[in-house]
Image (spheres, rainbow, N blue to C red):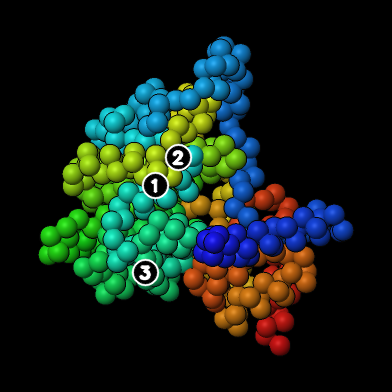
Amino acid sequence: MISQDMIRLGTSKSVIRELFAYGLQRSQEVGSENVMDFSLGNPSVPAPKEVQDAIIDIVKSNDPMVYHGYSSSQGHNGCRKAVTDNINKRFSTDYTQDDVFMTCGAAASLNIVFKALTSSPDDEIIVLAPYFPEYKVFIEGQGAKMKIVDAKSDMQLNIDGIKEAVGKNTKALLLNSPNNPSGVVYSEKEIKELADFLSKKAKEYGSPIYLISDEPYRELVYTEENIQFIPKYYDNTIICYSWSKSLSLPGERIGYVLVNNRCYDSTAVMAAVGGAARFLGYVCAPTLFQMVIERCVDVKPDLETYRKNRDMLYSGLTKLGYNVAKPGGAFYLFIKSPNGDSEDFSERAKAYDMLVVPGTTFGAKSYVRLSYCVDTQKCEKALPIFEKLMKEFKK
């Protein structure tokens, strides 16, 4: 008998991917310039020149057996040291290469951590809605239960909701800031309050509650306030990181797991991470791109196009009367449908060849997600469509 759960996952539809496929079809029919496709979070800004130069130099200067060969399971020493040197310099920490496990991107990192932490089918991982849809697949696939807490109306942390949700079966809480799909950056005040609460509950239950920080958008921040580095506030933190967005490398699948060295029994946690990676077949992250990251770990992303698109759309949409979560980072806008029905809004937008993703898939049925990692001209063309849609709803 074939796994029915896997058949279900293999045949279930991804709304995001369906819209993207529809956009490709419509582009062939009416021209790509006439399709406003805001469905996929695929970076539109090219990888920095330093990345391109590093790839060329590595290939020219090394034996192919080096950059095409295996690394150690945990990753090349040089790459892991470069990663921790960068973190230590930026956040005044004292990590060593032994605190990092290189992975095939944030999806692999999350699956590894969920597997490493889950020891009972009763284990619960709290997720804050709106959330990246694959979290449910990852968490349940690794044997835990996902427990959802809705965000506040401004998409910030719902501390009261979290306090109600945490119980004796809570193994971890998953944070994603800047957030996909809202672009919201969680405030330092709320993170401190959350950390204090989780510390008290862990002491009460006599076992650690882990805080898993999913950080593919950490470098994509447009506010003057620096992004909060969660381990500074909470010892039992594990970070899942990816360069897919910051260096525009989604296809290269390169990232890491960082176990905070002040985490309870951090040596055992890191051993579990290594064991989970082995069990899942996620050892030996791509060698060429470990070598690229070793050289480019300090390279900063070019945010100007994203910032310009964000400012234009946020200003334009709010002037038109839309309720939009204030995006401090990432490259998404979360827009409330005037009638509270995201699927209806998405279908109406589709009639104008504008593609936005219904929030139902993110656990927020009243909102649609717009990915503004596109050419600025498409953002300009979108605003008149949003104006027409608003007039339709007012009728």
Q: In the rendering, at what x and y percent does residue 64 appear? A: 58, 16
User: Which numbered disc covers residue 147?
Assistant: 3
Packing grade of label 1 (10 A; few <14, some 14-19, many >=20) is: many
Q: Residue furthest right?
A: 29
Q: Is 227 above or below relative to 140?
A: above
Nearest to N terminus: mark 2 or mark 3: 3
Q: Is 72 above or below relative to 100?
A: above
Q: In the rendering, at what x and y percent does residue 143 appear? A: 38, 59
Q: Which residue is mark 2?
A: 282
Contact, CB < 8 Å: mark 1 with mark 3?
no
Packing grade of label 3 (10 A; few <14, some 14-19, many >=20) is: some
Could one spot residue 45 in this view of the protein?
A: yes
Element type at mark 2: loop
Tag 2: residue type? Tyr
| Quarter where residue 88 is shown | top left
Tag 3: residue type? Lys
Q: How many marks?
A: 3
Viewport quadrant of the N terminus: bottom right
Q: Residue furthest bottom?
A: 395
Is 292 situated left or right of 83 in this image? right
Q: Which residue is mark 1?
A: 112
Q: Is 354 above or below relative to 111?
A: below
* 230 or 393: nearer the viewer: 230
Element type at mark 1: helix
Tag 1: residue type? Ile
Packing grade of label 2 (10 A; few <14, some 14-19, many >=20) is: many
Could one spot residue 323 in this view of the protein?
A: no
Contact, CB < 8 Å: mark 2 with mark 3?
no
Q: Residue at x 51, y 64 (%)?
A: 5
Contact, CB < 8 Å: mark 1 with mark 2?
yes
